[in-house]
Image (spheres, rainbow, N blue to C red):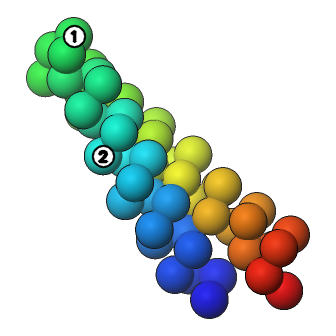
């Protein structure tokens, strides 16, 4: 369940970060997508640890 939560967080926040960053430019979208993905992995891990275990 831990990996699933991290995957879902990574996909959602990576997409949102890429979409928002792409409004400023392609490279900004790429960087924001990476940052969003890392934040999604962390938040997915925290949600699984705090609420699902």
User: Can residue 27 be spotted in the picture?
Assistant: no
Tell me the CA gap for discs 2 and 1: 15 Å
**Does dot 1 land on a helix, a strand or a loop?**
loop
| The one of 47 and 27 positioned closer to us in this rendering | 47
Circle 1 crowding by C-alpha within 10 Å: few under 14, some 14–19, many from 20? few
- Considering every residue shown, the one lying at the far top of the view is 24
x and y percentages locating residue 2 in the rendered image: 64, 82
Residue 16 higher or lower than 6, as above or below: above
- Considering every residue shown, the one lying at the far front of the view is 51
**Does dot 2 land on a helix, a strand or a loop?**
helix
Residue 5 higher or lower than 33, as above or below: below
Q: Which of marks 2 and 1 is nearer the N terminus?
A: 2
Q: Which residue is drawn at 57% across and 74% down?
A: 5
Q: Residue at x 45, y 58 (%)?
A: 10
User: Can residue 40 be spotted in the picture?
Assistant: yes
- Horizontal relation, residue 34 to residue 48: left or right: left
Q: Name the residue under label 1.
A: 24
Badge number at residue 1: none
- Horizontal relation, residue 24 to residue 43: left or right: left
Check the picture and name the quadrant holding the C terminus: bottom right
Q: Mark 2 points at which residue?
A: 15
Q: Residue at x 28, y 35 (%)?
A: 18
Check the picture and name the quadrant holding the N terminus: bottom right
For residue 17, what is the image quadrant?
Answer: top left
x and y percentages locating residue 27 in the rendered image: 19, 22
Circle 2 crowding by C-alpha within 10 Å: few under 14, some 14–19, many from 20? some
For residue 21, what is the image quadrant?
Answer: top left
- Considering every residue shown, the one lying at the far left of the view is 26
| The one of 50 and 34 positioned closer to us in this rendering | 50
Q: Residue at x 56, y 81 (%)?
A: 3
Pointer 2 with pointer 1, Cβ within 8 A: no
């Amino acid at each position: 369940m831990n990996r699933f939560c991290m995957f879902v967080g990574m996909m959602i926040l990576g997409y949102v970060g890429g979409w928002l960053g792409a409004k400023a430019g392609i490279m900004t979208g790429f960087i924001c997508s990476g940052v969003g993905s890392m934040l999604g992995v962390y938040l997915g891990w925290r949600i699984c640890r705090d609420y699902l275990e």
